Image (cartoon, rainbow, N blue to C red):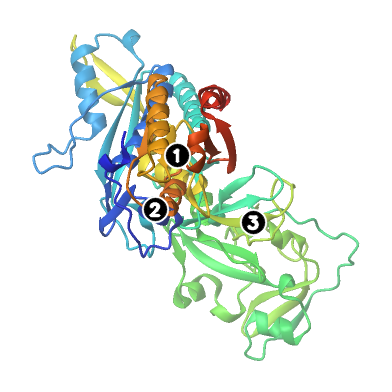
């Protein structure tokens, strides 16, 4: 393909996101309005290569492609993909032996709610391409096994594309277990905690805290009451020379309409997301001072885990268990207890992990320390919910169907992959994703020797079915070289001053090395390169 006939509208962008800069400067995409992008021919080719990998692997797992209507148009019925598919299953299936059925489709979507994200770029595009997969089962074990199969399939897709990723297990807003595929990016909206020495990865706000051992060599002292003199526990501890890590902060929560005491160390921060997961409910809140006084008979300033009403449950973070001779509220006005020790001076019903983890802390798997990185989720596998949809199948009998859900955001995958395959010069696509195999350049289109050799090579490479982008433009050689580096085609062949001697320069973009070779060597070297890559 002659480059003069390919629409490659390179432009500038104000975005701080690397993917946007790379893809806009090289003429792959341009933002047309907030969160909306135009995809030009080169981007279309890369996206089709990504889709080809997805289709290959999904079909290998017997998940076949369908084409469903786009239900966000004005004439839409309001039916979800699942409802549409179930309606077809009801018409065609006459027994459970015909299940499971697994299908997927790829459609453009518009995010229903998109909060403004500064410089979020293509990773959070308002319009995006989504692969949605569904599997229909009558057996829970079978559905779970299918989910494990799709987890392997998604991993193979990511490996074939070549993007580094991590899989984390989490819970969605409906409390269902899901597996998220994470790509790291400085423009990612989420923060992830990752061990420096292992594969441990978690959302930073849900990262497990490493447990601290109790220093049993420390002698426990006798607990004593002290006056607070109007101070809260942290300032009081400082005035008494007690480290913040030895303070016990006490919170009284209303959990499902029941009072619950929560304890955490003063140098730690309570994590309400972990509380929500612990209690399996979002129906909890801090009690106000009036409610607190009704339960404990004391105001906020001096509450603690001692002298508690009978039956009041106490949950303490694991860090509290490591305190020796600490300080806490005495549940008396302006009074605190010093030299207090958990399990000796007060009872804890449950020790749990309910604190925020900070960067630099030990990894919970015992391997290295945690670093925080920005990233984005590009795929989800949602564990089938143990609730069946009842449908009347073709013979009018009722059949209970369990549905598995699998999603991959192709737009995010495209952007994150572009970031990964890049350097200071521009993009550097791998063979499996590149829009073309070879970029053929003529330094001087007015030079007959160069023109003749370039056309000869172009013809030969087309005969070998290589996808060739032939830069036939009448622009400076420096401009051509800069453009070629930005486009990121795997192999660049430059026909220049040595064309009269039958010599060309071949550069492998991924490795950056340039080699001079005779024209007769080119096809052999290219075959070797594409065979081994």
- How far is the residue under mark 2 from the one under mark 3? 46 Å
On the image, the x and y values in percent for residue 387 come to 36, 30
Q: Which mark is residue 479?
A: none
Please name which of the two marks, 2 or 1, marks the residue nearer to the observer: 2
Disc 2 element? loop
Q: Which residue is mark 2?
A: 476
- How far is the residue under mark 1 from the one under mark 3? 34 Å
Depth order, front residue of 166/345: 166
At x 73%, y 77%, the residue is 337
Query: Of label 2 and label 1, which has the lower sequence position?
Result: 2
Please name which of the two marks, 2 or 3, marks the residue nearer to the observer: 2
Query: Of label 1 and label 3, which has the lower sequence position?
Result: 3
Disc 1 element? loop
On the image, the x and y values in percent for residue 359 come to 64, 61
- Left or right: 254 with respect to 164? left
On the image, the x and y values in percent for residue 382 come to 42, 35
Depth order, front residue of 352/256: 352
Q: Residues within 10 Å of mark 3 (few under 14, many from 20)?
A: some
At x 40%, y 47%, the residue is 173
Q: Is residue 343 above or below residue 380?
A: below
- Left or right: 369 with respect to 531? right
Please name which of the two marks, 1 or 3, marks the residue nearer to the observer: 1
Q: Which residue is mark 3?
A: 371
At x 23%, y 26%, the residue is 67
Q: In which image quadrant can residue 167 be found?
A: top right
Q: Which mark is residue 489?
A: 1
- How far is the residue under mark 2 from the one under mark 1? 19 Å
The residue furthest bottom is 229
Q: In which image quadrant can residue 434 be found?
A: top left
């Amino acid at each position: 393909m002659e480059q003069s006939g390919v629409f490659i509208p390179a432009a500038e962008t104000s975005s701080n996101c690397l993917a946007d800069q790379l893809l806009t400067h090289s003429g792959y995409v341009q933002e047309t309005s907030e969160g909306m992008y135009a995809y030009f021919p080169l981007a279309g080719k890369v996206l089709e290569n990504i889709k080809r990998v997805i289709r290959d692997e999904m079909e290998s797992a017997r998940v076949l492609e369908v084409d469903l209507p786009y239900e966000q148009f004005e004439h839409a019925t309001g039916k979800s993909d699942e409802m549409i598919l179930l309606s077809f299953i009801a018409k065609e299936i006459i027994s459970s032996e015909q299940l499971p059925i697994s299908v997927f489709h790829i459609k453009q979507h518009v995010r229903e709610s998109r909060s403004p994200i500064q410089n979020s770029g293509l990773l959070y595009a308002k319009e995006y391409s989504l692969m949605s997969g569904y599997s229909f089962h009558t057996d829970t074990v079978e559905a779970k096994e299918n989910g494990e199969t799709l987890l392997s399939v998604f991993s193979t897709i990511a490996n074939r594309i070549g993007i580094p990723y991590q899989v984390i297990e989490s819970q969605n807003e409906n409390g269902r277990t899901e597996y998220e595929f994470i790509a790291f990016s400085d423009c990612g909206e989420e923060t992830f905690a990752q061990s420096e020495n292992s594969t441990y990865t978690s959302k930073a706000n849900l990262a497990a805290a490493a447990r601290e051992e109790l220093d049993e060599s420390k002698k426990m002292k006798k607990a004593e009451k002290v006056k607070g003199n109007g101070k809260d526990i942290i300032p009081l501890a400082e005035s008494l020379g007690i480290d913040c890590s030895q303070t016990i902060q006490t919170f009284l929560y209303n959990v499902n309409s029941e009072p619950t005491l929560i304890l955490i160390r003063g140098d730690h921060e309570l994590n309400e997301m972990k509380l929500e997961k612990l209690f399996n409910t979002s129906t909890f809140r801090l009690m106000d001072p009036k409610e607190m006084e009704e339960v404990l008979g004391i105001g906020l300033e001096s509450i603690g885990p001692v002298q508690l009403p009978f039956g009041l449950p106490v949950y303490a973070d694991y860090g509290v268990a490591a305190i020796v001779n600490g300080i806490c509220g005495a549940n008396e006005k302006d009074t605190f207890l010093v030299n207090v020790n958990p399990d000796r001076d007060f009872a804890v019903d449950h020790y749990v992990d309910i604190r925020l983890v900070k960067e630099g802390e030990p990894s919970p798997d015992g391997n290295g320390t945690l670093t925080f990185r920005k990233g984005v989720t590009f795929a989800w596998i949602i564990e089938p919910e143990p609730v069946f949809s009842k449908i009347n199948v073709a013979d009018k009998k009722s059949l209970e169907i369990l549905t598995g859900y699998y999603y991959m955001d192709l737009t995010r995958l495209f952007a994150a992959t572009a970031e990964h395959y890049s350097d200071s010069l521009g993009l550097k696509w791998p063979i499996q994703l590149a829009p073309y195999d070879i970029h053929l350049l003529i330094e001087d289109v007015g030079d007959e020797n160069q023109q003749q050799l370039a056309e000869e090579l172009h013809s030969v490479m087309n005969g070998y079915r290589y996808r060739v982008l032939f830069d036939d433009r009448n622009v400076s050689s420096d401009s051509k070289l800069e453009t070629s580096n930005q486009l990121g085609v795997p192999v660049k062949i430059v026909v220049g001053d040595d064309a009269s001697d039958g010599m060309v320069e071949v550069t492998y973009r991924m490795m950056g090395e340039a080699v001079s070779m005779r024209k007769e060597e080119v096809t052999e070297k290219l075959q070797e390169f594409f065979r081994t890559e």
